[in-house]
Image (spheres, rainbow, N blue to C red):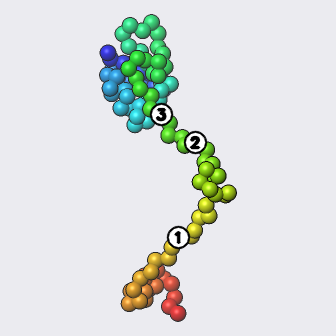
Amino acid sequence: MQILINRDGQQLGPYTPEQVNEYLAAGSLSPDDPAWHEGLAEWVALNQVGGIVVPATATPPPFDPSAFGASSPPRLHPRPRLWLPVHLQPQIRQWSGTPRN
């Protein structure tokens, strides 16, 4: 089967179902893009074409902290400081423009 796609008024293709599935997974095509192949009476949404697999959206479910024994979300800690050997610290201060103590 060869599929034609209409995107923003421009006809694209023909593509095989495998190519369309790859483009959908990559986000190059939308499941709502109009599509047509031989045997269809009219253009239909791409997600209505047989053999086309619309990738699932990766939306996580709502987080329930009580399921993990916590009454509130974990507190975020500031980024840890970078500790360097003493002999390298003056060089870093010099490079970063930080005045020496």
Amino acid marked by disc 1: Arg
Where disc 2 sits, the SS reads loop
Relative to the observer, which residue lies in front, 93 or 74? 74
The residue labelled by disc 2 is 61
State the residue at coordinates (34%, 22%): 17
Where disc 1 sits, the SS reads loop
State the residue at coordinates (47%, 29%): 30
Residue 56 is marked as 3
Amino acid marked by disc 2: Pro
Q: Considering only order in the chain, which callout, 2 or 3, is on the residue closer to the N terminus? A: 3
Residue 26, placed above or below residue 72 = above
| Furthest residue in direction bottom, as rendered | 101
Q: Considering only order in the chain, which callout, 1 or 2, is on the residue closer to the N terminus? A: 2
Give the crowd class for mark 1: few <14, some 14-19, many >=20 residues within 10 Å.
Answer: few
State the residue at coordinates (51%, 88%): 99
Residue 88, placed above or below residue 2 = below
Relative to the observer, which residue lies in front, 57 or 69? 69
Give the crowd class for mark 2: few <14, some 14-19, many >=20 residues within 10 Å.
Answer: few
Where disc 3 sits, the SS reads loop
State the residue at coordinates (52%, 93%): 101
The residue labelled by disc 1 is 79
Amino acid marked by disc 3: Ala
Residue 5, placed above or below residue 75 = above
In three-dimensional space, the C-alpha distance between marks 3 and 2, rounded to whole angstroms, equals: 14 Å
Q: Quarter of the image for the N terminus: give it.
A: top left
